[in-house]
Amino acid sequence: GAVVSQHPSRVICKSGTSVKIECRSLDFQATTMFWYRQFPKQSLMLMATSNEGSKATYEQGVEKDKFLINHASLTLSTLTVTSAHPEDSSFYICSAKKRTYEQYFGPGTRLTVT
Amino acid sequence: QKEVEQNSGPLSVPEGAIASLNCTYSDRGSQSFFWYRQYSGKSPELIMFIYSNGDKEDGRFTAQLNKASQYVSLLIRDSQPSDSATYLCAVEKGGGADGLTFGKGTHLIIQP
């Protein structure tokens, strides 16, 4: 199997606070994990690539100081949205790479910033 | 020019028929190609990946890749109502550590 979990599945926070989202590969080791964001009726957009033991690589336009990524082990990556604002409300989805080609997605975290 | 293009649909297909989904991509350096299925409010589910020209079959699904034409397709045979979803085409540049570039998806409706 290739199971990826995310926690929490849904979070509501107030503007200005920080939110941490965890992504875990449950039955395999993932040297590379990815974070995506999906706004309503849009497709997934890659935010950053996370490699175990090294700094994340961010896509153009994604603020690395706002979206902090930590890949602490081969099965865990975390995304912290700092000083969240309503425009950060979105569906955040992580994925983990199993072997060379296959990328499996977690169930997603729906963030609402009020 | 958009990197990965798909017809947004909706594509309506009778139950039991073949559903044909198409995707074009702009980056000739792309190495791997993926089809994901996404139900409303859920995360994408991997259906198939393909990286060599030609056809790849898995059960009711067949992926087809033509790198010269920069075209990839997905055929779903014996379509079932449970196949109704948005199908996302995704492309990876290669190297093993790249994230995916997604198309906007095709909304498929299988009519009972």
Image: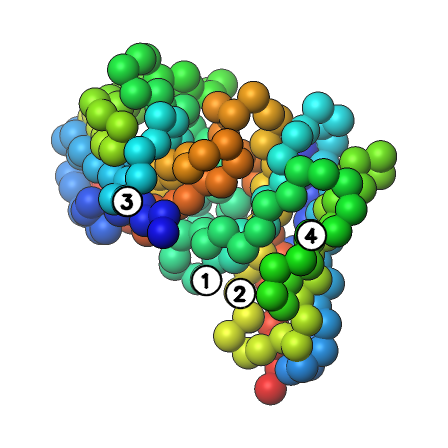
The residue that label 1 is drawn on is: B39
Circle on res. B85: 2
Q: Which picture quadrant has residue A47?
A: top left
> What amino acid type should be assigned to the residue bearing mark 3?
Asp
Is residue A10 depicted above or below A83 in this figure?
below
What residue does disc 4 label? B56
Neighbor class of circle 2 (other Cα within 10 Å; few <14, some 14-19, many 20+) is some
Task: Sort mark 4 into few (<14), some (14-19) or many (20+) by Cα contacts within 10 Å.
Answer: some
- Is there a contact, CB below 8 Å, between mark 2 and mark 4? no
Q: Nearer the viewer, mark 1 or mark 4?
A: 4
Q: Are marks 2 and 1 in contact (CB under 8 Å)?
A: yes
* Residue A61 position in % (x across, y down): 46, 20
Q: Which residue is mark 3?
A: A27
Residue appearing at x 31%, y 39% in the figure? A28
Same-chain status of marks 3 and 1:
no
Host chain of mark 1? B
- Mark 4 lies on a secondary structure that is strand
Q: Is residue A36 above or below residue B27?
A: below
Give B101 or A5, whichever is nearer the viewer: A5
Q: SS of the residue at dot 2? A: strand
Question: Could you say whether the residue bearing mark 1 is in a helix, strand or loop?
Answer: loop
Report the front residue among B3 and A86: B3
Could you tell me the amino acid type at mark 2?
Ala
Q: Is residue B103 left or right of residue A4?
A: right
Amino acid type indicated by mark 4: Lys
